[in-house]
Image: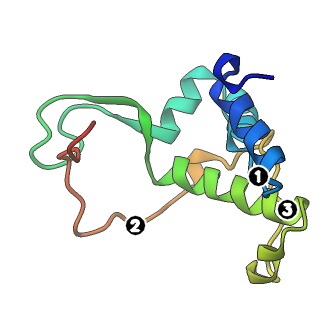
Amino acid sequence: MSILWMTFPDAMREIAKEENVYLIDLNALSKTLFEAMGPEAAKKAFVYYPANSYPNQATALADDTHFNTYGAYELAKCVVKSIVDENLSLKKYISKNYKNFNPNKPDDIEKFHWPESIFMETLKPDGN
């Protein structure tokens, strides 16, 4: 099959297979995760903040590309899940306290707390 006619996720899977390398399929895991959240709740995993949520932020932020700390945490849990489920050699670095994560049942955003960095700024990096 020609990679030129595949979707990016399919091409990624095909190349991993051809190269005989491990694949953490975040495309599939994140699809499950965000579908479980639903369209409106999934926005809480991205940079969606009303104007003046942060100092010097005069306009609302609505960014479907970049994760906030909650979204990054949930995706990191998907990565760890894949490492454990696929029994990858990296598994030896996973804490013995790890509790299995189910992307069909994301953590409750209302119970999630991550202290913001004192170095946080609202300016997006170049390239966005």
- Which structural element holds mark 3? loop
Please name the residue shown 63% across and 58% down the image: 76
Q: Residues within 10 Å of mark 3 (few under 14, many from 20)?
A: few
Q: Vertically, is 68 above or below 87?
A: above
Q: Position of residue 44 (x, y in %)?
A: 50, 37
Foreground disc of the pair 3, 1: 1
Quarter of the image with the C terminus is top left
Q: Relative to the observer, which residue lies in front, 10 or 93?
A: 10
Relative to residue 117, is residue 128 depicted above or below? above
Left or right of 34 in this view: 118: left
Query: x and y percent of residue 94 in the render?
Result: 76, 78
**Which one is in front in this view, the residue at disc 3 or the one at disc 2?**
3
- What is the distance, in whole Å, between disc 1 and disc 2 at their CAs? 32 Å
Instruction: Identify the residue position indicated by label 3 in the image.
Output: 100
Residue identifier under label 1:
23
The amino acid type found where label 1 is placed reads Leu
Residue lying at 68% horizontally and 16% vertically, measured from the top left: 5
Point out the tag, 3 or 1, that comes first from the N-terminus: 1
* Label pair 3/1, CB-CB below 8 angstroms: no
Circles 1 and 2: CB distance less than 8 Å?
A: no
Q: Amino acid at mark 2?
A: Pro
Which quadrant of the view contains residue 56?
top left
Q: Which mark is residue 115?
A: 2
